[in-house]
Amino acid sequence: MTIINIKKILFLFFCLALAQTHSLFASEDTKQLPAIDLDFCQDQLESLPILQNGRVKPLFVHAGETIKYLTGKNNFQQRSAVITYCQLSSSSLFLSTSAPEIRTPIEHNEIRTLLKSVLSPNNDVTYKDLFSSLALIRNSYMAQKDENAMKRSLNELLHKLSIYQSIVSGDDWKIPQWDEEQKLTWSSVKDAFSPLQLEKNSLISSAKIYAYLTNSQETYRKQFGDKHLLELHYAKAKLPLIAIVLTCLALLVLPLTKNIWIPLALATATVLTQITLITLRIIISGRAPVTNMYETVLFSGLASLILALVIGHFKKEKSYLLIGLFYNFLTLLMLNFAHGMLSASIGPLVPVLRDNFWLSTHVTSVIVSYGALALSWLMANLTLIENRKNPLSRKALQERMEHIYSAIKVGVVLLAAGVILGGVWADYSWGRFWGWDPKETWSLIVLCVYMVILHGKNTSWIPPHRFVPLVAGAFLSVMMAWFGVNYILATGLHSYGFSQGGAIFLAGFFALQIIILLVTAPNLKGPGENPQA
Amino acid sequence: MSDSNPSEQQAAPVSAAKNIFSQWEKSIGGLKFAVIIIALFTLCMITGTFLESYQGTEFANRMIYKTWPFMLIQFAMFLSILYAVFLRLPAKKHFYGFYVIHTGLILIGCGSVITYFAGIDGSITLLPNTPTRDITLSNDILVINYLDEGDTVTYRLPNNALESSIQDEYRDIRIKKFLPFSDNDKIWGKPSDSLATQSSEYLIFNQNVAQEFTLSLHPEAKEFGHGKELGPLSIHYLPEELGNCFLHIAKSKIIIWDLDTKTCYPPEQRKVLVKSTSKGKRFLVVKKGSEYLTFFPDFSPFPLTKDFNILRDASLRTFSLKPFEEGPQLFLFGKSAAYFENDKWSVYPLKLKTAEAEESENSLELPWMNFRLQLLKHSTIEIPINRPRFVYPVQKNGTLIKGGQKAVLVEAMGEDYWVTDARPVSLQIRGKRVNLQLAKESLRLPFEITLSKFKMDTNPGTENPASFESFINIFSAAGNESHHIFMNNPLKKDGLTFYQASYFPTEQGGTGSVLSVNVDQGRPIKYLGSILLVLGAIWHYRIRQKSKLKQRKSKTS
């Protein structure tokens, strides 16, 4: 038996034991609950302002994110996320049988075996059953000695359960209330619909509660305006989806037509869509749109597409557009489908980041530089793959090198500026210009990697046939600085779920790039070796 | 560079020296050298970040960032940049951007050297309303305090990552070894005195977890303690003879314990009356020899004097078991254990673990979460001793889980002693008291800082911090002043800059604040260098762009 820290475990037991005594399904108090059905939970409540995770947002956004996280789906049995969430969170407050029994899919095989008594044929489990198996899950979690996939999945399951529990107990969200002096206070649904409050506000039926909620929504709008509704429109507009469709269209049209204006128009439409998306996020969050992975990925894709349009225009070169669109497509793919890794949720910032000037200069210049370096990376890979299919002439290779070089120049200048701005910011808020912190060190590593290539380019060591594969490989350092520091090196900064998805993504990326290099690089021949040189 | 015209005999060696110099200049200032040195620098940094992630910041600093080979690489980079500029002199127009970039880099290098040698980078820990004037720096020192002479000597410990042998001597103390990262090996040995006490080692386990712990009543083994908190479970370690008393607990639930005779008994047994004060506080008066001692057992095990002072040197103790009947409380008496269950106290013997016996056979079942207890070792002669051993540190979730202890081995009067950051050592050398302690180097401020208030705002409706703010008073010869320091708003005073860095809860329930303190004379030079670097890079690529366009035009024409 391995000796592990029993103190923590005992504490966990203690906490969970406490949590269990919490009236989850209110078995004993049921008799005293007011007999009100949950019909007040209607889709019209989607614009209700709620306070959650330190921010006022419409119910639609929070309910959507939460139900998606808990069930992996956007709605539940034809009921919208808003209705499902509202009914769940009110189910323990009223005597009602109509609470939805939401389910969570179980992916891990061993956990399926563990929960086989409650597992449905579709390999999912209702949260009620999951809760009754809490002791089993907990014991199994603690019996895992190593940080393996099973332990992480169990941890995620326990996390989902705790969120579910907080929803069901009516603690998860707060609704606006007005005291005697008409001052706004926020109280959890549990408190707002406690028997005492129900009696006080004479909320005796579902219709009355609905009227009460719509009324507080109106009062909130009168007092504070419609700002929180912007997020509702933002969430409903599904701009990332529109952007990826436009980018796809542009990419499809580009090789089919000789008329450059059609793909150009589509690319411009994409840029406009993404600018709208970013602007909305800026207005909603009130800060520069570069504070989490979701936003940096979004911003780098947009920046690289704009850079591609600008450089392509001046160089009169079509391949920039192709590359810019393709990179933007890749980032949009992540934004639309990699929910496990990039969370679209807008949350409050840690104190040190709360400085819009530095945030918008330092982080933005680093992210734009990553966008530019991504152009050089894709251009290099394109060259390698094209050359593998059909060897390029020396002149074509030379031209490609020039294009790659142009993108690197922009990237390197912006990165140097970004690293220095980061140093100045660190000096300004922590009192040191440089502290060998992993994030700053990796940004310097990226700069140095490109410096090696740029200096070596002028020596006999890095001729064109080595330059191209080196540039393709150098982007791995960007990925490491950008994702790797958070997903691989980070120590306790991100929850298991996040880092797990991130680490797999990064490993896959590295493997793919290395395979491309191994397959294509030997085909690029040095001077004198290339048959068409 | 033009050759001078010395006499023929001298010409040969001078030109040879010049050749060597220009060769040297060419290779150091050359692109290939730059490529090698930047690549080396990059490799070191990559290693550093992985070390930092798996083994902690301090190990990475001691292994890479703050070592001379890494500094040497940076110096080589500096030389490479410098010679690269020399090689391209006298100035040519298409190198203007290049000159600016490299001058920027040289300035950043110079600024960093100034910061390294003259700068101060430390922190100051402020307790609420407690004047403080000491800045803690990062270097480890051994403080030798000659208490009788009022003399203090500090010895600066090396900044190595691994175990280092020192062999330095000061007066009667020889400093032998420094372990920057260590864990303790527990060994059993004889104490320096022949005090008869007891020490025991136990294992507590259930189907999922297990933990060993050692408890001792000997003063030299006080770091093992005589109590332990394992989550909600409290463990109390008491002398063996008290175990018997838990067998006969009377109605009062009080035990009287005589240290002289090593006996214990309930008050009822010797007809000692337990009375109550007018406010309902229980007390008893016990006769010891000719003395009458008054106890308030629910309040303190020690007798009280008439004016309610605690009498610590009396040889009688009393204690009430009532407070220990709630929640999981386990009493251990070496070879027996007692706990309260089903409204009564029960004592159970503990058998030593034997090689043949199954784990559950010899162990005692506890009434909490299927836990069982096993006695592993018990001794009245030997005591547990912690012996530090170098280990590579391991970091998990931001904290070191292995190797987080620093230790110095010193020799005095022919005996070895380990000083660790958790445990200072007190010695008698030639009849004089000497205290040895591991600490961080510190610096005295010319003024005094007091934290008058610490404020933490949270995001609405959550416990997550939104801002940390320290309200401080500075008291100096010039007078009193108040300041407000928060994230991104430091205080500048007398060349020092104070930044809000961290906070911590105090034992009194308040909040203390940690400020980082900083003097950086290299700052303006580094900033100038940075600006030049960025502007130069833009200029450089503009020039190259233009010259390329020219080339292209001339080609096409």
Image (cartoon, grey):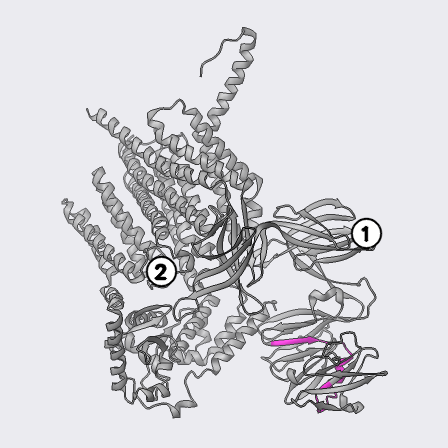
Q: Circle 2 marks a residue in which chain?
A: A
Q: Nearer the viewer, residue B55 or B525?
A: B525
Q: Position of residue B163 (x, y in %)?
A: 66, 49
* Residue beneath disc 1: B413
Towards the viewer: B515 or B546: B515
| Amino acid at circle 2 | Leu
Say whether residue B184 is magenta. Answer: no
Residue B241: image quadrant is bottom right
Horizontal and vertical percent position of residue A467: 36, 37
Give coordinates of residue B394: x percent, y percent.
57, 56
Q: Chain of mark 1?
A: B
User: In the rendering, at what x and y percent does residue B251 appear?
Assistant: 71, 92
Find out whether residue B250 is within the magenta segment.
Answer: yes
Q: Secondary structure at mark 2?
A: loop
- The quadrant in which residue B158 appears is top right
Which label number is shown at residue A516?
A: none
User: Quick check: A500 above or below B295?
Assistant: above
Can see residue A501? Answer: yes
In the current view of this chain or complex, which residue is farthest to the right?
B290
**In which quadrant is the N terminus of chain A drawn?**
bottom right
Q: Which residue is mark 2?
A: A342
Q: Tell me the quadrant of the picture where the C terminus of chain A can be found.
A: top left
Q: Residue furthest top?
A: B8
Q: Nearer the viewer, residue B42 or B166?
A: B166
Q: Residue at x 37, y 68 (%)?
A: A54
Residues under labels 1 and 2: Cα distance?
A: 63 Å
The amino acid type of the residue labelled 1 equals Met
Label 1 Cα neighbours within 10 Å, binned few <14 / some 14-19 / many ≥20: few
Look at the image and give the residue range highlighted in magenta: B233-254
